[in-house]
Amino acid sequence: MREHSFGRTEFTVSDIGFGAWQIGGSWGEVSEADGRAALNAALDAGMTFIDTADVYGDGRSEKIIAEVLKARGGKRPMVASKAGRRLNPHVADGYTKANIEAFIDRSLKNLEVDSLDLVQLHCPPTDVYYRQEMFEGLEEIRKAGKIKHYGVSVEKVEEALKAIEYPGVTSVQIIFNMFRQRPAGLFFQEAKRRNVAVIARVPLASGLLSGKITASTQFAAEDHRNFNRNGEAFDVGETFAGVPFETGLAAVEEVRKLVPEGASMAQFALRWILMHEAVTVVIPGARNGEQAKANAAASDLAALSADVMAASRDVYERLIAPHVHHRW
């Protein structure tokens, strides 16, 4: 597992990290035992970055992380959480220093730490990125010692570009995968120039790029791939990367032809992301230990050829871009 600096911070992280949404909720049933096994397997494989949020299972994800890290002891990985989605209603005016600090206090208790390594505003409404007072508030919270660093988790490239204008923003989490390629343009250039860490989320397009989902796959009622198909609960771009399901399945069959011998499609999709130098860490989720180990192994795949990268771009431009490129 390769490691490198996390932007301008003092942290060094593995290029593949652990996305802890699945062990919290909204992905069908994942037992706490399986969640612990997945996280332990990820850490055993060398992952040194964990991404969670206070709303993943209403704190369940954060609490499982705290339990596992306490039991393991030794050097801790970098743990990033998020704040803001607990607001009800989730509106721009709710993003105040007082509200975010209250959410941070709750995460500190859940994670059993005195200071969060990184807190990210959790996909706030676009207007929040234009409210300097929110970022000044985060800076005050940082100086008070409750957080070491702060960043943002965004839906749109435009939001990412606005966020990194604030000098204290050290990281941006954004959807980036073979079905969501727009960030690789201007945003990646600017992030690299400013030494902003980039966290690539939804790397497998909610499982589409695992190659295991078919038209007959059934998703549990509590799985967002069932209840958020049209953006009923949150931004539709979070589910299947915003790609219409049938279109995504057709594109997967084209991608399948590009997967190198000895690799799974999921590993290939993760390695594709790591071909982009601006990406600091990619955060696939895992429902169990086997998935976590397989994700980690993607780091060891050989670099993809220029021909393969061009072919993947062609699939995107022909089948996917008309649905997503202009939206996010």
Image (cartoon, helix red, strand yellow):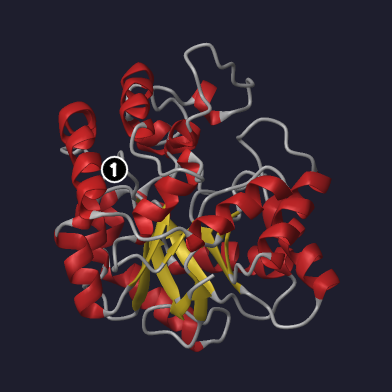
Q: Residue at x 20, y 48 (%)?
A: 307
Where's residue 251, x and y in %? 31, 26
Q: Nearer the viewer, residue 320 or 313?
A: 313
Along the horizontal axis of the image, is 134 left or right of 193?
right
Q: Image height check: is 294 above or below 26?
A: below
Q: Amino acid at mark 1?
A: Arg
Q: Residue furthest front?
A: 261
Q: Is residue 132 left or right of residue 213?
A: left
Q: Secondary structure at mark 1?
A: loop
Above or below, 44 against 293 in this view is: below
Q: Is residue 262 visible?
A: yes
Q: How many marks?
A: 1
**Position of residue 165 in the picture relative to residue 120 (left or right):** left
Position of residue 220 measured from the top left corner of the image (x, y, whole percent): 64, 21
Which residue sits at x=56%, y=17%? 217
Q: Residue at 34%, 80% (x, y): give it.
A: 168
Q: Which quadrant holds residue 222?
A: top right
- Label 1 sits on residue: 180
Q: Is residue 174 visible?
A: no
Q: Position of residue 71 (x, y in %)?
A: 85, 70
Badge 1: residue crowd in 10 Å (few <14, some 14–19, many ≥20): many
- The correct choice, above or below, for 38 with respect to 170 in the image is above
The quadrant in which the C terminus is found is top left
Q: Position of residue 302 (x, y in %)?
A: 41, 60
Classify the position of the N terminus by image quarter: bottom right
The residue most toward the top is 216
